[in-house]
Amino acid sequence: MDNVTQIINDYGESIVQVDGDIPVDLPAKDGERFLFISHDQSFLTHGLHKYPAKFFPELPRWLIKRYSHKHDEILDPFAGSGTTNVEALLSKRNSVGIDVDPFSRFISQVKVTPLPERELKSAQKSFMEAILNYDPSQVTESDLPNFPYRDNWFNKEILFELTYLRKHIQQLDANDGIKDFFKVCLSSIIRSVSNADDNCTRTVIRKKLNKLVKPSDALNRFAKTVLTKVPKMVAFSQNYPSDITVDFPEDMDARNIKYAEGHFDLAVTSPPYVNAVDYPRTHQLEMYWLGFAQTSLTTLKKQNVGTESVSASHYKNRHEIGVPEADKVMAKIFEADPRRAFIAFKYLDDMRKNLTEVYKVLRKGGRYIVVVGNNRIRGQLFENWKYLMPIAEKIGFEVETYFGSEIIKHFIKVPREERINTDWTLVLKK
């Protein structure tokens, strides 16, 4: 194992560092700490679109190869941007990705859909010509999308450029798969050409940043994106195993998995952290441009596990999950902020429902691998992984092992006091 070394971190702790691909037979003992250095964040279709707090590909790749066989059925009940599903596909496993967010399902579907090289290159050529021949007069006011605070988020020139590109996608002489791929390319530049802070989990305009967006930025960024991402999609399509299936059902969520008992051989996921990332708000501009939202995002927010959208009637009284350590922390949070205490409780309760559902659809002997982080709520350290293990055991899982991995890179910055320094991987066996 040439890429595996023992190091000492800044706190004097001994850590196993793995550089790149994780060896399938790498031993992982209870409580051991790893530093996984990823080289594949933009490998093939993985880098098609930024997504907060997403899996780095080497981790699900390792877990899938270690705990399953070719043609097995793999589940990710919190699919996010589909990293587990791409890796399952490339490892010749069938997979299902479940997510309540239609934007998430859309990106994931594009990342696992092979496309013919000739058609991709033809569409790319068409875009380059359209960009060279751009004239704002080709866009009318009625072509512009209508969504809340549109003219605050985008400069007039950028609005016209993005609309021109969107119009060109709609008019492409190509199938929906090709059009959807270019929609994701368009979506991937929207935050950077808006007036919003590029590095925040919330979509906000920070005047202090003095962000400068110039005319032609949308056209230039889109051209660069297409020239980078078309070859990656071509390479992915050439690596695509034809006899493998990937599905992203629209009528399920992590607490309601409509598959037969024992259907899956393995489940691998990284669920949201409690009150850490507001996914709909992070992607609101992209959702407006792609037509996944027109007005308020509250309904979608309320469906998310870990949501902050809760009703006042729910947090008048203190709730307990039945795990003494968790209940003790939530009681302290309740003293400072009853609302945050309820958000923490609801997160654990939703995860209990998810664990119950996954237990049902896993075959006997199958594993559910959950990669989860900690965070601070009103000054209290909320150690999700420690609370989820006893909840899982009550449902019937055996905790086979658990280990930590240090986090060295986030696509989106979070405030220092909320930063999560270690993810914990729980290997739960049915």
Image (cartoon, rainbow, N blue to C red):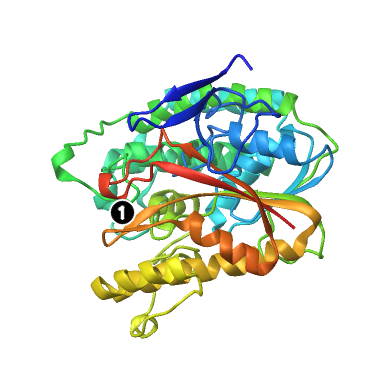
Q: Which residue does the image show at 34% across and 36% down from the upper left? A: 192
Image spot of residue 396 (x, y percent): 70, 65
315 vs 411: above or below: below
Q: Residue furthest top?
A: 2
Picture quarter with the C terminus: bottom right
Q: Nearer the viewer, residue 299 or 287?
A: 299
User: Which three-letter amino acid code belongs to the residue tagged 1?
Assistant: Arg
Q: Which residue is mark 1?
A: 150
Report the side of 69 relative to 11 (left or right). Answer: right
Image spot of residue 42 (x, y percent): 53, 28
In this view of the protein, can residue 372 be seen by the observer? yes
Q: How many marks?
A: 1
Picture quarter with the N terminus: top right
Q: Nearer the viewer, residue 363 or 120?
A: 363
Q: Secondary structure at mark 1?
A: helix
Report the side of 400 relative to 412 (left or right). Answer: right
425 vs 130: above or below: below
Image spot of residue 355 (x, y percent): 63, 63
In this view of the protein, can residue 173 be seen by the observer? no
